[in-house]
Image (cartoon, rainbow, N blue to C red):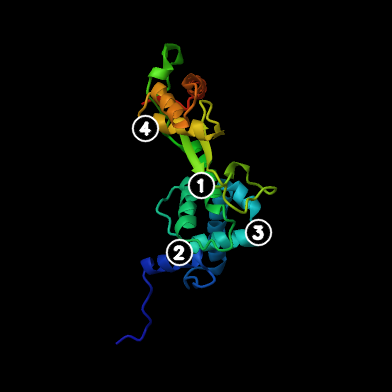
Amino acid sequence: MSSQPKQQSFTETQYQFARHIRDPEHNPAPDNIEQRRMNIYRELFYNNIEGFIANGFPVLRQLTSDEAWHAMIRDFMIKHHCATPLFHEIAKEFLSYLNSERDLTHDPIFIKELAHYEWVELALSVSDAEVNEINLALLEQPLNEKFNTSALAWPLMYQYPVHQIGPDFQPTEANQTPIFLLVYRSTDDRVTFMELNPVSARLIDLLNEGNTAQHAAELIAEELQHPDPQVVINGACALLNDWLHRGILVFA
């Protein structure tokens, strides 16, 4: 009977290699890989992951100390197993980590919402969604039409004013009223956001529910118990025209 140690299979080496790359402090490197090369692999892998996340979440990176940031990236690498080979999807995987695997005890209370807001910009910038633009010259009565927000226009609601967060402003409690934002990619491929008030956000919701713009405006006037519904309808018409010119709306 042979007393020679069992040779590690290629698959076992791969798994050991991956465990070491993710968490080198607690997992030894494979014996059959030169240490110099292992150092290069380890640094390249970490730097790529860290770089993609830093570029995807620039405000979060700016607000986080170097020590805390690199500890969070390492924690992400250890705990989260990405389900995609696409580099631009790493930011989405990082969101999943924040939502389900991260211990948020010592993080800013707004971290998940800020990260989501920053991810939206990236997601819209790389989206390959096809949008059927409306020929405005042929649109005679916009109020009588049914519209939806474009696949490149996302209405969002947050508890924190994520669009204002930065080094000089970091909220310590949620807003008493929701923050409504609309983030969209314009025809020249710029990602832009606009802040909505509760009425314009409600108009967006009613349009997406299948109402004509006219009916949506009438419902809002009724909900507000406005003494002159025509004022609300006129306001809705102005918003509608603005959103149509920005390419935010498409035919339902």
Say which residue appears at 49% left-offset and 24% top-offset.
227
Please name the residue that numbered disc 3 is placed on.
Answer: 66
Mark positioned earlier in the residue sequence (2 or 1): 2
Which one is in front in this view, the residue at disc 4 or the one at disc 1?
4
Q: Write down the residue under mark 1.
A: 116
Mark 3 or mark 2: which is in front?
3
Q: In 3D space, how far apart are the residues under numbered discs 2 and 1 (Cα atoms)?
A: 28 Å
Question: Label 3, label 4: how many angstroms apart (C-alpha)?
Answer: 45 Å
Q: Which residue is mark 2?
A: 18
**Mark 3 burial class by Cα count in 10 Å: few <14, some 14-19, many 20+:** few
Asked whether, in this view, residue 99 is left or right of residue 55, the answer is left
Q: Earlier in the sequence, mark 2 or mark 4?
A: 2
State yes or no: discs 3 and 2 in contact (Cβ < 8 Å): no
Of the residues shown, which amino acid type is indicated by label 1?
His
Q: Is residue 152 visible?
A: no
Residue 167, x across and y down, in percent = 68, 49
Could you say where residue 121 lies in the image, as x and y percent from the top left?
53, 40
Amino acid type at circle 4 is Glu
Look at mark 4 in the image and give the residue it sits on.
209
> Residue 232 has which mark?
none
Instruction: Decide which of 230, 10 is in the foreground and name it.
Output: 230
Name the element at disc 3.
helix
Disc nearest the viewer among 3 and 4: 4
The residue closer to the viewer here, 213 or 94, is: 213
Q: What residue do we see at 50% from left, 61% from top?
A: 102
| Cα distance in 3D space between marks 3 and 1 | 21 Å
Mark 2 neighbour density, 10 Å: few (under 14) some (14–19) many (20 or more): some
Q: Secondary structure at mark 4?
A: loop
Q: Amino acid at mark 2?
A: Ala
